[in-house]
Amino acid sequence: MNEKKLIPLAPILVESTRSIGYTFESALADIIDNSLSVNATIIEVEYGSKAANAYLCVVDNGAGMDKEELRAAMRYGSRSSLEARNSVDLGRFGLGMKTATMSQCRELTVVSKKDGKLSAAVWDLDYVIERSDWVIKEFSEAEINNLGIPALEGLKKFDSGTLVMWRKFDKLERSAKDFNGSFLDKVNSARDHVALVFHRYISGDGFSVPIKIYFNREPVAARDPFLTAHPGTQPLEERTIRIDESEILVKPYILPYISKINEKHLSYLGQKEDLKKNQGFYLYRNKRLIVWGTWFGLHRQYELEKLTRIRVDIPSELDSLWSIDIKKSTAILPDKIKKNLIEIIANSVPKSKSELTYKGRKTSNSGIKTAWYEVENRGTFQYKISRDTALFKLVESHIDGSGLKYMEAFLRDLEDQLPYIPVYKNIAESKVYDETPQISEDEILLLAESNIEMLVSSGFSESDAVAMISNEYTYSRYPSVIAALKERLK
Ligand SMILES: Nc1ncnc2c1ncn2[C@@H]1O[C@H](COP(=O)(O)OP(=O)(O)OP(=O)(O)O)[C@@H](O)[C@H]1O
Ligand SMILES: [Mg+2]
């Protein structure tokens, strides 16, 4: 046997790692992962979009690296994915910083500050090609100041920290019609992505201090996809699934109905039209959102269940079980916990449905009588107008024999013409329907008085009559009118 060492050809291997499928936003999030893994509390993203000089820097106040540590960090495969990591470490493969950067540009510069000293190293793809070898450039402290790094002062102001800079955006230069505009578009969607995937860091959920992230000095606000602080969101019971020594926490939420959410909050949930496809599991690894809007094939995405989102917290020690990929943007559900999750879906999804279903019973859950009710007959359903409400009875009492016949025909015609399909379509598109009552308060007061009079003449006491009509949806929507009627009783 002959042993032969085969070292990969640097330009070829680096070039091929550029295509492992990072998007601009997932690549930037990977750089921010590194900052959070070394306990940074301030992360400043700075960028300039002028074509040949475009740059993007991520500066953090984390632990920083000395010269040797930086050299190790620059190596492709700096740490093994089999090595155990501490619970704040968001890394796994020892590749992210290099592959994420090179997926977007040709030059990675890292400057780090530790014990008051600066170290810098650069992966420059053109230099790798020129030397046809795995070579980085290293710079002395004096040289660093002449590298023309826009955010260097930002790093210097911290006691320790790291600056990662991307330059030479060759792919975008080739593909964009308007480089400046496309670059800014990418940075903007990356900001939204960062606001979402790190929302628990930004809002300080379970951390000793909230993490501050800035984009060109503008602070990024957390985008909580559960609107946990919204009074309309219903948190359901949290469950713990134990696997060996580790715990997976599962907590379902039912989002508030769309008409109860303002524009700003709605934008946190994604577009209204996308609510259906954003339902499902939201998987967090060490509190960082990695995958969302999927049922992992355990369930289908139904329109009526679009308000269900289930938070799943996994610790990084279960990475291999979930087949977390290098980009930390895909995961595969382990068989071991399928059964538990199916059960949780079955318990939470019907709650979302009931939030969405129409007030369509003769009496709703609260015992209030409504004008429409649902009739189900062997799998088909229809909505009918109730002939049992006080207002209907009042009308009836003013119509004679042949008039009643016409009215009955008219009501059936109305029932037959209920526009099911357009209503369904609008609701499906999350259009909000106008819930303002169409009868004025003055009119409703007159109607209520006549209604009470009618009930009294058919033998009810006045207080019973008032109680009866306040139990009708028609009148219950006018609390001030009901209050006035009750006041009169006294
Ligand atoms: N901002 C930073 N501050 C301090 N150290 C850093 C920073 N960024 C990277 N490092 C060091 O460089 C190493 C390599 O980073 P890299 O992102 O390439 O791999 P990783 O984070 O270990 O794993 P992954 O491939 O999953 O991202 C890290 O393990 C860390 O030690
Ligand atoms: Mg990393």
Image (spheres, rainbow, N blue to C red):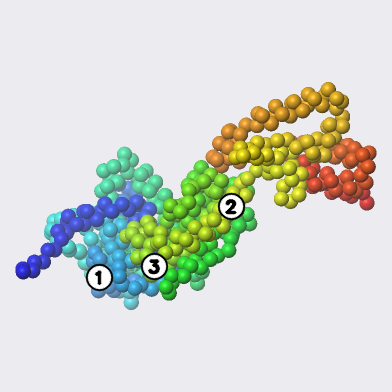
Residues at marks 1 and 3 touching, judged by CB atoms closer than 8 Å: no
- What residue lies at 43% left-to-right and 54% top-to-bottom? 296
**Can you tell which quarter of the image residue 141 is in?**
bottom left
Please name whichever residue, 127 or 313, is drawn nearer the observer in this view of the structure.
313
- What residue lies at 25% left-to-right and 53% top-to-bottom? 18
Check the picture and name the quadrant holding the N terminus: bottom left
- What residue lies at 32% left-to-right and 53% top-to-bottom? 22
Looking at the image, residue 189 sits to the left or right of residue 18; the answer is right
**Could one spot residue 40 in this view of the protein?**
no
Q: Amino acid at mark 3?
A: Leu
Q: Is mark 1 within 8 Å of ligand 1?
A: yes
Give the residue at mark 2.
350
* Residue lying at the far left of the rendered structure: 2
Sooner in the amino-acid sequence: mark 1 or mark 3: 1
Residues at marks 1 and 2 touching, judged by CB atoms closer than 8 Å: no
Q: Residues within 10 Å of mark 2 (few under 14, many from 20)?
A: some
**Could one spot residue 18 in this view of the protein?**
yes
Disc assigned to residue 72: 1
Give the residue at mark 3.
318
Looking at the image, residue 430 sits to the left or right of residue 53; the answer is right
Marks 1/3: CA distance? Answer: 25 Å
* SS category of the residue bearing label 3: helix
Please name whichever residue, 128 or 288, is drawn nearer the observer in this view of the structure.
288
Looking at the image, residue 58 sits to the left or right of residue 392; the answer is left
Q: Where does the image place residue 283, in percent across and percent down from the top left?
A: 45, 59
